[in-house]
Amino acid sequence: MKYFLFVLLMVLPLSFICAQQNAAMLNDSAMALYKNDPQKALTILEEALRISKENNDQFQISKSKNNLGIVNRDLGNFEKAKQLSSEALSTNDSLLKASAYNNIGVVNRNLAKYDEALKNYLSALDIYQAKNMKSEIATTYNSIGLVYSYNGINEKAIEYHLKAKDIFESLDNKKGISEVYNNIAIIYANDGALEKALDYFKYSLEIEEALDDKKGMAESVNNVGAVYYYLNEIDSALVYFRKSLAIEKSIGDMAGISASYNNLANVLIETERLNGTKAYIDSAMHFAQKSKIAVDIESALDNYSKYYEAKNDTKTALSYFKELVVYRDSLLNIKTNEKITELEIEYQTEKKEKEILSQRADLAEQELELNEKNTQLLGLAVLAVILSLLGYLFYSQQRLKNRQLKKENELKDALLKIETQNRLQEQRLRISRDLHDNIGAQLTFIISSLDNLKYGFKLPEKLSDKLKTISEFTTTTIYELRDTIWAMNKNEISLEDLQSRISNFIDKANLTSNTVTFNFITNTSENEHIKLSSVQGMNVYRIIQEAINNALKYADANTISVEFNYTEDQLKVDVIDDGKGFDIENEQLGNGIHNMKKRALEINGEISVISNKNQGTHIQLQINDLKKYTTNDV
């Protein structure tokens, strides 16, 4: 009987170990194949969870739940994925907890809960950095970059993507490199650099095909199709979108299926191929609502509005457009960007505080070592030497304390500077987002409503002309609002960027005036790296804009020239026309010239106006000592 009991006690732990190993093997095998066969992976993971629960193996239970959350996320079952990974957070294993935070972050990002997503990613990043896990750190940097990219904070997004790229390249991680290039390409595409974006997307697709990652292939194929669409190569775009749809269907990814149907519908509407298009939109809305993907629901509503507008059913089109505006307003809460910036401030501040504590600990150790050495010397030296050493040690300790205080003050100043810069960026983001999302959307709705009135009703000619004037004025207001947002979103503006903006304005002015010849001359090719503050750049742009508008309205000119010159830290901008001119001494200057002088005064510049009757007008803006205005501190 005793022997039987002894054998039983030995067998039970062995059976438990076997079950534990079996659950671990099932988890590993499922995650190795889930990209290409997610349904089979789900079946294997459910079995691993059942075995883990039978043996009360808490680690494997949490691991199985988190893996189930990852696969459900890829299939677009976001709420279920979030629940499973949240339950996995009960584990004591820090790496498993970090993986769960990352998966919840991806889900929240897809559900447009960007502030929560960033908080999840930062929690995961803390764990990976503490363990110096480079690949996981890079993956998390890439995910944080996506949050900023989705919110239009492109400079911050590229900063995190490039951090991830450097680490992935050092590790030769092909999948990571592919994802980084794909994410950077999206930013280039949104900025209009389509050829560059296409190269990056195709490079990403080559890597995904080599890895045989169907999910990655579907995303890259879809992105290539989108670029071809914007390049107006419609047939190529349709081929890639249909290819993406086929791959997404093969792996059962509801999110991808919805996006592909939306893309196909949008291209067909734009090219006026309306037969069967509504079926695509219906399918997109079905899968988007099933997976609760905010961006795809929004795209489907937009496609419905465009489809009925193309069918000349303006009443139904306007109904869907109003539904789209309401839905978009419910998502684009201004506080989202504010919370993201606040979390970034908290994270960076906490990091600096840890560095301060670490440096203080190092200084304390150094001081302790110095005191111990002093004690040894005191025991061996004669009284005269001791007295001289005491004086020297007192002086050294005082210098050490002074250095310590100096370093502490420098660190405090650095923290204060970071907080100030972040608060300033926060205010800029809040104001620009408010202008774009509220005022911009309202102006766009006004234009759409005016167009619907003109085309939906037979109006008297006089009233129709008045509505056209209001629509054109509103459109001009939107352009000026975009110029303001462009300047507000930048800490500094390069001379090259400013000249490009002015060149675009001149091109638009040239289209509206067939009788005037425009000349744009720049003698600053070697100095285009020079930076101006956003205030300087905007004021210079507005002065030139005002000068050109005045020449078009009042000068009856045949030629208008704009010239940039830079010499010895001095920037000169000349606007010259050959119009009828005016007598500066005897004519009262208008608000336009007064406004230009006021703007020049705000940036410590000088403006001069030279004009005589029948001899044209010459307006010159001069900014001296430009160096002191070209730093980031301006």
Image (cartoon, rainbow, N blue to C red):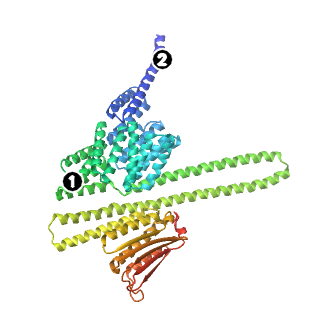
* Eye-nearest disc, 2 or 1: 1
Q: Secondary structure at mark 1?
A: loop
Res. 114 in view: no
How far across and how far down the image is residue 149, in percent? 40, 52
Horizontal and vertical percent position of residue 65? 38, 35
Give the quadrant of residue 587: bottom left
- In depth, the one of 450 and 346 nearer the eye is 450
The kind of residue on which mark 2 rests is Met
Residue 254 is situated, as x and y percent measured from the top left of the image, at 29, 41
Counting residues from the start of the chain, the first of labels 2 and 1 encountered is: 2
Task: Name the amino acid type tagged 1.
Answer: Glu
Other-residue count near label 1 (Cα within 10 Å), few / some / many at <14 / 14–19 / ≥20: few
| Separation of marks 2 and 1 at Cα, in angstroms | 76 Å
- Decide: is 62 above or below 377: above
Mark 1 = which residue? 272
Q: Which residue is mark 2?
A: 10
Q: Residue furthest left?
A: 458
